[in-house]
Structure formats: C-alpha cells, structure tokens
Image (cartoon, coloured by chain):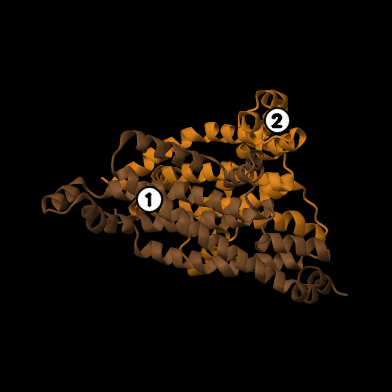
Amino acid sequence: MIQSFFNPEIIVASWPIVRAGLLNTVLLSLLVVPLGLFGGLILALLASVKHPAVRWPLMAWVDFFRAFPPLVLLILLFAGLPFAGLELGGFVCVAIAFFLNTGAYYGEILRAGIDSVPGGQIEAARSTGLSRLQAMTSVVLPQAVRNVLPDLLSNTLEVVKLTALGSVVAVPELLYQARQAQSLTYNPTPIVVAAIIYFLMLWPAVRLLSRLENRAFAGP
Amino acid sequence: MSSWERFAETFLNTKVMLKYLPDILSGVVVTIELAALVVVTGIAAGLALALLRSLGIRPLNWLIVVVVDLFRSLPPLVVIVLIYFGLPSVDLSPSGFVSTWLSLAFVLMAFSEEIFWAGITAVARGQWEAARSTGLSFGQTLMSVVLPQAFRLTIPPLTNRTIAITKGTALGTVVAVTEILGQASSAMSNSYNPSPLLMGALAYIVLFFPVVVVARWVETRLAWKR
C-alpha cells in the first residue's frame, strides 16, 4: 500500500516534475480567474441594460455555457479548429474556453449582485452628477461584489479546480505533470502527491466557504 | 467550391455525420446511464451523510466534514485519474465507467451533503423543539417537520451543482469511457473530419440545455426569500 501510493523514493524522484506542474497550475489560475471575471463583468454590465433585445440573447448565451461541458468546449477548440486552419495550441485554447465558460458563470453571479443593489442607489448617484458609467463602477459594483462574495469565491474555487482540464490538451499543469511522472515511474504515487497538493491548496477556501454558506442560509 | 461549401464539407459533412450517427447515439445512451447513476447515488449518499450528521455524534461528524471537504477541494478529473490509474496497483481494476461514476458520485455526495446540511440547520431550532414537544420522535420530527422545509431551501443550489457535476461525465473520455465525447473524438480521428465532434457537441446541448432551462425556472419559483 505504502509502496504503491506513498513511495518516499518516488516522491523525491518525481518532485521536480510535480513542482513544475504546481507552479504552472498557480500561474494558469492567476491568468484564467481574472480572464473569467473580465468576461463575467462584460456580461453583467450588458445585462444591466434591461432591454429585451439584449436580455434574451444574453440569457441564452449564459444558459448555453451552463449546459455545455467545459471539456467538450476545450476539445472543440483544440481538435476542431485546426480543421479550419487555426491551430492555437493547448494553452491558448484553455484561455479561450475558460473565458467563455467561466465568464458565463461569473456573469450570472455578478448580474445577481447588481440586481441586489436597490435602484434608488443609481438614481441617487446619477442625481449627484455622476455619469451612468461612474455610478456603475463606483456605487453599484462595489456593493454588488460585496453582496455576492461567497458565490464569487465558490466559483473561483471551481475555476482553479477546472484548470486540471488543461492536462487533456497537454498544458503542463499539476495533473499533467503528475501523470507524466506516473508513467515514467510506473507508480501512482505522483498522482497521490498531486491530489494532496490540490487538497492543501484549496482546503482553506473550502472551509471558509462552508462557513459563509452556513451563515447565509441561517438568514438574519 | 465557395468558401461556405468548403466550410460545410469540413464541419457539417452529412456523409460523415450519417456514418457516425449510431456511434454518437450509443454515446448518448452511455452518457445518460452514467449521469443517472451519478445523480441518484451521489444525492442519496449526500442525504444519508447529512442525516447521519444530524444525529450529532462528534467523531462521526468530524469524519464526515473531512470527507466532504476532501471531495470539494479535489478536481473531479484528479479523482477519476486517481481511481482509474491508482487502484490497479492494489489489484483493483475498476473500468473507466466505474471510475468515472464513483468519482463524480463522491463529488456530488460531498456538495449535496453540504447543501442538505445547510438546509437542515436553517430550519429554526424552535421547530425541532415544538415538534418534539407534541410527542413526535426524533425520526418523525426529521421526516415530517424539518426535511420538507429543508428541501425547499436546498433545491435551487442543488440543481445548479447537480448540473455542473453531471456535465463532468464528459471527463470519462480521459479514461476511455465510450460516452458522447469519447465516441465523437474517436469518430473524428477515424474520419479525419471534425463533423462528428460538432454532432457530439450538439448532443450535449440537446441533453443539457432543457435541464438548465427547467433549473432556471425552478430556481426563480423557489427562490430563497430574504
């Protein structure tokens, strides 16, 4: 058991490979989380225009990506686009897929946040002479973000976990590197190590969320 | 040939599509089987854990929290890979289908336990006390007073989570499950044509889009009134 899953020699031997993966996972997360947030912000700002011609296509867009598995989107970009003469590479495909997929989720959360800010706030801000954009960025958004902070955190956790999909298109993140190490050593220890790293890295966020969610449910 | 015709020839090739339609359809069947198994077992296990937790046995509750936290922090793909490539070392060789099913069921169990538990704790303490004082037993109170109220609260977050995790059946393709994506990918490499992949993508939309729309409707109907 210990020989197969917690083999100390293999942990030492595979550490440089796994460590490089960990570093890439962190870097990848630092790229895709802001990218998704940016996509979500665009969607949420568009949704604040309450016109039906904007609202319905937007809702369809968001529901489309809620229904579409991110891995299928990634494979479509990675394996489908080369047939149209567009070869983007795993990394760029991950970035685009995350922008689209996690952007839709972030957009839905931010939209709920913006909706939770009373309309009187905008009217008050506008009447002090702020433009529509200024009212949105300095009055509505800060309150909106605060109101949906647990959901934003929860989605960010999911986004970081989702970076493991990169392994399917050969992006050398933590899972990919661990699998490389596993096939080099014929031993699943590196994958166990990767799992432990994911757990240690994300557990604090899970604990925090669990507290926030319980408090939100308990109501006032 | 116009550029549109060339595009259609590549991405919407009817000959290729017809040839691989049966494969994609068999993939749809596998995806539905896998999804149904994951949803039923994952939610049942999550509910069972939440009920166990309501008994208030300290060491047991700690164990439940650790297991739940573990499966909330691990990416589902990592769990799948761990089960599929790890267990053979101890002479257990689950198939790709079983590995994917177990992994996603564990993940759904963890998330649904957390949601059910939050629902149960949200029902005010006084409800328990009032029900118990009318002579109902612990079990009766749970079943006829607490759970019906808890369920209403849990449905919107639970449907969201369930959809997100059920979409993960596509991950099975990494461990050679012949679900939609797996069938579409192999059809694509056999035919040197991406049309099957587009067909697979369409199959996912047909399967999941109605679920998302119904979920959105349920969400607004049962929205948590603040």
Residue B226 at what x, y percent from top left? 29, 53
Q: Secondary structure at mark 1?
A: helix
Residue B211 at what x, y percent from top left? 50, 66
Say which residue appears at 68% left-offset and 38% top-offset: A173
Q: Residues within 10 Å of mark 2 (few under 14, many from 20)?
A: some
Say which residue appears at 54% left-offset and 67% top-offset: B209
Chain in orange (letter): A
Chain in brown (letter): B
Q: Secondary structure at mark 2?
A: helix
Q: Are marks 2 and 1 in contact (CB under 8 Å)?
A: no
Whole-number angstrom distance, CA of label 2 to CA of label 1: 40 Å
Is residue A170 or residue B101 the one in the foreground? B101
Chain ID of residue with mark 1: B
Q: Does B64 sit above or below residue A45? A: above
Question: What residue would you read off at disc 2?
Answer: A20
B52 horizontally vs A188: left or right: left
Q: Residues within 10 Å of mark 1 (few under 14, many from 20)?
A: some
Q: Does A197 sit above or below residue A38? A: above
- Residue A118 is at least partly visible in this image: yes
Amino acid on which the number 1 mark rests in the picture: Ala
Among the 4 quarters of the image, the one containing residue A71: bottom right
- Residue A128 is at least partly visible in this image: no
B103 horizontally vs A209: left or right: right
**Quadrant position of the C terminus of chain A in the picture:** top left
Chain ID of residue with mark 2: A
Q: Residue furthest left?
A: B134
Q: Residue furthest front?
A: B91
Is residue A115 or residue A13 the one in the foreground? A13
A77 horizontally vs B115: left or right: right
Question: What residue would you read off at disc 1?
Answer: B48
